[in-house]
Structure formats: structure tokens, C-alpha cells
Image (spheres, coloured by chain):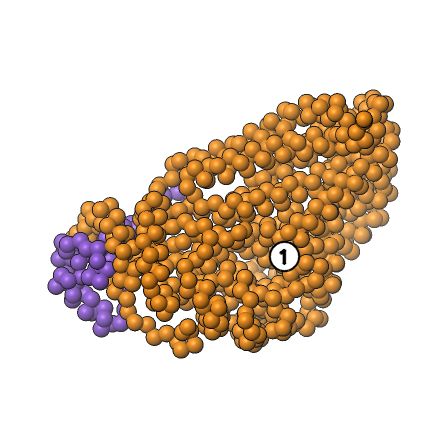
Chain colours: A purple, B orange
Amino acid sequence: MLKALSEAPLATDPAHCVTVRIFDYHYSGSIFGTASVESMTIGLNADEPLMKMILQWMREQKIDDVAVSYDGV
Amino acid sequence: MRNPLIHRGFFREMVRQLRTKGLVGTFILAGVNLIVFSVLITRDPLDGVMSNLDPRLMALPMLLFLYVMSPIMVFGAYRWLCKRVMSDFYHALPLSRTQIYASATAAIFLWLLIALGSYAVVNALLFTVFGMPFNYLLYLCVFLNMLLAAIEIVAAFSIGSALCGRRFAAFFQSVTVLFLPRILLTAFWMFVEGDSWLATPFSLLPFFLNPAFNIAATPIHSLIYNIDFANVPAMLYSLVYGAALLTLGCIAFRRRKSELAENPYASKVLQTAARVMVGMWSLISVIVLLNLRVASIAEADEVFSAYMLAPMTVSAVIFSFIFYCLYELISSKKWKPVVKAMPFYGLCIVLALFYIFVPNWIADLRKPSEVSADEIKSYRFNSESSLLLPFGIENTRSYPDYLLEHHTFSDLRGKALIATQSKKYQSRHSYDSLFYSDCAVVRDGGLFRKVVYLPDSSPSPINGPTRKQIYNTCMNDPAFADKLLSYPKGMIWYSCNGLTAAEAKEVGRLFREDFEKLTPGQRETLINTRNSLIDTTSDANVIGLRITLYGCVGTNNYYITYKLNELTPNATRCMLDYLNARYEKDVRQGLRDFVRWMEHPDDSMSLRTIYIGTLIRRRKRIPPNTRC
């Protein structure tokens, strides 16, 4: 699923758009253990079959957003 | 015609004598501006708008400068008071004492003004040139408060210098002159308002240290609250108080005898007061420090704490007694006054016990004060971080908070609702930010004073209304709802996650056009009211697209975050254009990495989170009482 998502065309029309945001966590490695977060967002076409599937699932779950996390986040 | 106050020649000489100190002070503050400049020039433009609407950033360097440089300047101008030969020479000059005092004080103020003024102007210019949010009117108020603080500090150290022949004693007596009235005034309001001190004796210290916090105008109830730099009555009180101190300094200077040079003090009363202050504060400090140490070891082990109580108290008293005697010994350089002062040490113990125990005892006896709806003048929300900071200065607040504070309800119904929901207000504060209100009610205390009551949130359950309840109540008032759902007023800067300030400004322009086409109901859905009236959640910019507006109206600052979705198509499209161009490569790569990781889990992969969100607005069920 996500493979197709990664290839989906860009979009800017809010009525047919899904935002995908990726967070990168950077640890300074200092004794204070501070971390900075960089976020990157793009808009992808919601009319793609994969997107339609995701959106359908989100409607069924009655949620606006979904977070996909890994590595324990 | 001779000027009875300022002697031009002596004034010029004083300016010349203080030039090194003045220039060093000016360069130190210029160094702060250099740091500001380096931060502004090296910042990442995608970090969004850096806000300098927060007066803490403006006030702190100036305040630290005043506390360090004012005593140095005063002691520099009056260094001849501590040498008998020089003192005789200056006293023999064909000038009146008033002229010497006024000319020296004017020279000190001139150098302080040069340092503070050049710092403030360059600071404001830097933020303007870099296009950062900057509230000029508030900055002017902060600057005026600092000038008033300079009057207080210079006057207090002038009094100390006039009353002592040695610098060590002069320093402590000046500190006593500066802070003792504040402490006594606070105690006075404590009894007038029937209120208590805060939980620990040191909670009040930051406020005593900040001359901009005027206790006369903002009494004890507000001590835990933010400092309002734009409070004109408070500034007038400070001006009158500073002028009175300057006059006292002049009187002390006129009455001073030249023989006082190299002798410790002229006033036994002030010396005793300074000594008792040293003894009392050292006793309280040692008790608090030992108590913290014991608490960290015992972790509320009552048996251990009780066991440690006696040795802890005895140690604190011994330490404090040593400080008390040392102060007298160093200031007088003789043993005889030390022996004479010893019996008065008991006063330190009595005052310290009073300071530590009596306020809490009064608070326990007192019934919780209740505020009726008729008495309420306005409401205030605390900003989240302000309470935890050392100078407790007002932070930037959200737009709904700003509106609530300045809104006059058209009838008493709204006020009554909040008063009823709040049940009771007590000034003892316990902070719980997100769900239960830190909403305070403000009533008129007379003499231009505003008395702030905070809802008691201990013991549980919490008595204060939730922010959601307050929001619903406020939205029942059509005038309030109309203001909240209109486009915010004042000077506005825009910030969008991942966009430069110039790009965010363009999105903001389109957002305004989109916003003004919407109905009030549609506008309400754009405001993030996820958990509360105010968008205080840190995930405001996590999911979906957002635009944050930083604004200022007069001396008031605010911020508000709106969602961008299909209701605001032009702004959303513009923002996505920028984001797609900037991040397409990185996000696609991130998604591919994620897919690869799912197929071949690899522990070495960096920590990442992916959010997928639609921009298509979902219909929310809005409670009937929040509709306009």
C-alpha cells in the first residue's frame, strides 16, 4: 500500500488532496539529550485508488488523521 | 543665574569621571544586541516566525544591567565619601550639597540612559529589519519601566552611600532601603486583603527583585500573576516612590558630616535593620536549603524528617548567627559593636518564624473568599509558561484569552455563569493547565488596583470550570462570538510550518480573503478547540495544515492558529505549492524508506513518524449553545 502511496502524484486542491507529513527526529547527543524535530509535508492526489482506500477506511473509522509510526514511536 | 540644583561644571566633571563605567556598560548591552543579531542572521528561515512579542526577552537584559551597573555607577560617583581627605575636599567645594547630589545623580542617569537607550533603539531596529514580530508600544512601556527601576535603584544606593562611610555597609544598607519597603508593603496588603504569602518564602523573591512589578498597584493576589508593563497607575506609583527615595537621598546627603568617611554608618537604626535583614534572610535561606536537602534524601519520610528537624534548625541558627556577626564585624571592623549586636539576633529568629509560619496560619484560619458576579470586572487566563519563569512576566496569550480579558459582557448572565461554574475563588494557586481552568477573575481593588482571584484547585476535585465550559459560556454572548469569529485586529505576522516568513505572509493574505467569505459557523470550525478554549496543545501544527497569526493590539499581544482546508482553498493551494516544491523529494524518499523497513526491519533506521491527513472538512457536531 505504502509503496503505491510513495509514487502517488502531487496535488494542491484541498478537495482532492491528502497531506502526508514525515517527522525526522534528530538527537544532539549532548549530555542534556536534547532532540529536534523536522517535519516535511506534501499533498498527494486523493483520487488515486490507494488514497481512496485509505480515505474510505478513515471515514469508516470517523477519524480525520492517521499516524503511522515505527521504531517504537 | 545659578541653577540651584545642577551645577554645570560639576555635572560635566561627574560625566567625565563616570565615562569608563558608562562606556563599559553601553558596550555590554551592545554585546547583547550582537547576540540577538547573530541569532537573527543565522536562524533557519523555515523555523517560522520568531516572536519577540514576549516582554521577557526585552526586559531581562536591561534589568540585569541596572542591578549591576547602577550600584557601580553610584559608588563610582561617591567614592570620595569613603576617604576622609577626599570627603573634606569635596565638602569644601563652593557648591551646595544639593547641587553636588543632583549633579552627580544627573550624570549617573545620563550614562544609564545612554546605555539603555542605545540598546533599546538598536534592538528594535534589528527586529524591524529582520521582519520579526515586534510590539513597539509595549517595548516603550518596558523601557519606561526600566527607567523607573533605575530611579529606585540609584536613589536607594545614594541613600546607602550618604549614610555610610564604608562601601560594605553602604551596600547592605542600600539593599535594605531598596527591598525592605517592598517586603513591608507586601505584608501590609497581605493583612488588608486577608491573604497569605505563597507556599515558600522564596516564591516572592523574583517579584521583589523586579522593580517593574509594583506591589502598590498590583497587590498580593497578583504576585503569582503576570507583570503588566503597560499598567499606567503602577508606573505612576513607581515614579512617586522613586522621587520620594531621591528626595530622601538628598536630605541624607545634606545632613551628612564629613567625619563619617571611613566610619561604618551614620544611622544606628538603618545599620540594625540591615544587620537583622542579613540575619533573617540567611536563617531562612539555610532552613530552606537544608529542608530541600533533607527532603531529597528522606523523600517525605516523616520519621527521618522529624528526626532531622532539631539538628537542622540548630545548624541553620548557628550559620545565620555567624553571618549576622560577620556582617557587623566587616562593616564596623571592631569587636565591640559585634558583642553589642549579639542580643538583637533573637529578632532575626522571631521575624524568620513570623515570615515562615504566620501567613500560612492566617490562611488556614481564613474562609475561602468568594467573588460574586457583580464584582467581577474581567477574566484572565494564565499563559502556560509564565508561572515557571524566574521573572514571571506576561507571556504571549491566545486570541480568545485576549478577547476574554477585554470583553465586557452585555449582561450579567455570562459573568454569573462563570462565577457559578467556578463555585469559589481562592487566591492560593495551584496550576493545572490544559483541562481545568487557570482562569482568574479580576475585581476592582480601589486605588487603581486590580485584585486577581484564582480558582482553588486543591484539594481535589478541582473547582475551577473547564476551559470548554468557559468557551461555551463566552460563545453565548453574541458580542463575544462576533469578535472571536471575525478576522483578528491589529498588526499581524504569519507563520506556517515549513514556510519562510515571506511565503507565510502570502499564504496569510490569501487566508484572509478566504476567511472573510465564510459564515461564522464555518469560521468556528477553523479554530482549534480540540480540548479547550485556547489552543495550548503542542500538536497544533502536527496534523493537517495550519497557519498561526501573531498579532498585537496596543500593548496586548496574542496568537491564534487556524486550520487550512477546503474552506480556505486559495490559502491551502498556495501553501501546498510551496510545500510540494520543497519537500517532494524528501517525503517520497521517507515513504520508500518506510516501505523498505516494513519489508526488511532494520534496527539502525532512524526514528520517524508519518501522518496522513485529509484536508476535507468533516462535519462536527457543534453543541447548540455554541452556535451564533
Q: Indicate the position of residue B397 as horizontal and vertical percent values.
A: 49, 56
| Quadrant in the picture for the N terminus of chain B | top right
Write down the residue under mark 1: B223
Horizontal arrangement in the rendering, residue B289 relative to residue B621 (left or right) = right
Q: Indicate the position of residue A2 as horizontal and vertical percent values.
A: 16, 58
Instruction: Write the residue at 70% across / 42% down.
Output: B152
Is B532 placed above or below B395 here?
below
Horizontal arrangement in the rendering, residue A17 relative to residue A4 (left or right) = right
Instruction: Write the residue at 46% across / 58% down.
Output: B398
Horizontal arrangement in the rendering, residue B517 relative to residue B54 (left or right) = left
Between B146 and B67, the residue placed more toward the observer is: B146
Between B320 and B368, the residue placed more toward the observer is: B368
Q: For the residue marked with disc 1, what is the amino acid?
A: Leu
Q: Indicate the position of residue B466 as horizontal and vertical percent values.
A: 48, 70
Displayed quadrant of residue A56: bottom left
Q: Secondary structure at mark 1?
A: loop
Instruction: Write the residue at 68% across / 67% down.
Output: B363
Horizontal arrangement in the rendering, residue B598 relative to residue B108 (left or right) = left
